[in-house]
Image (spheres, rainbow, N blue to C red):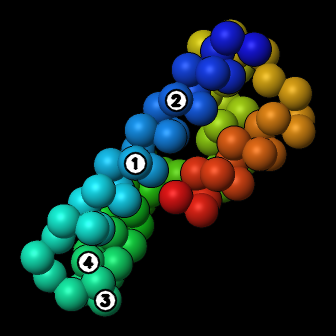
Amino acid sequence: MKAFGYVAAIVGGAVAGATAALLLAPEKGEDTRAKIQDSVKDFCDKHDIQNIKETVKNFCNKYKIDLTNKQTEELAEEISEA
């Protein structure tokens, strides 16, 4: 459960950072959202990420983080919405 807290903290920090960037950005929201979408797409393409849920499972397995299927799904959903 402690590992889930670390992962959730990282995701929460990313969401907070993205929110701050959107609020403080000097560009129109439409332009900023387009840049964010492009950046996420480029990141996913660069790191060969097609399925967020599978990626979360692989990350947890690699670092011996014990999450239930429900926790994995919730985390993948939070990442997708961010």
**Mark 2: secondary structure:** helix
Dot placed on the residue nearer the N-terminal end, 4 or 1:
1
> At label 1, which amino acid type do we have?
Ala
> At label 3, which amino acid type do we have?
Glu
Dot placed on the residue nearer the N-terminal end, 3 or 2:
2
The answer to whether the residue labelled 3 contacts the one labelled 2, judged by CB atoms less than 8 Å apart, is: no
- Residue 73 position, x and y percent, is 80, 45
> At label 2, which amino acid type do we have?
Ala
Instruction: Confirm whether residue 42 shows in the render.
Output: no
The residue beneath circle 2 is: 9
Q: CA distance from mark 4 to mark 1?
A: 16 Å
Dot placed on the residue nearer the N-terminal end, 1 or 2:
2
Q: CA distance from mark 3 to mark 4?
A: 5 Å
> At label 4, which amino acid type do we have?
Thr
Residue 42 found in image quarter = bottom left
- Residue 20 position, x and y percent, is 29, 56
Q: Residue at x 59, y 62 (%)?
A: 81
The answer to whether the residue labelled 3 contacts the one labelled 4, judged by CB atoms less than 8 Å apart, is: yes
The answer to whether the residue labelled 1 contacts the one labelled 2, judged by CB atoms less than 8 Å apart, is: no
Instruction: Confirm whether residue 64 shows in the render.
Output: yes
Judge whether 73 appears above or below 23 on screen: above
- Residue 14 position, x and y percent, is 41, 44
Q: CA distance from mark 3 to mark 1?
A: 19 Å
Q: Is the residue marked by circle 1 packed among few (<14), some (14-19), or many (20+) residues within 10 Å?
A: few
Q: Which mark is residue 30?
A: 3
Viewer-nearest residue: 46 or 11: 11
The residue beneath circle 4 is: 32
The residue beneath circle 1 is: 16
- Residue 46 position, x and y percent, is 36, 53
The image quadrant where one finds the N terminus is top right
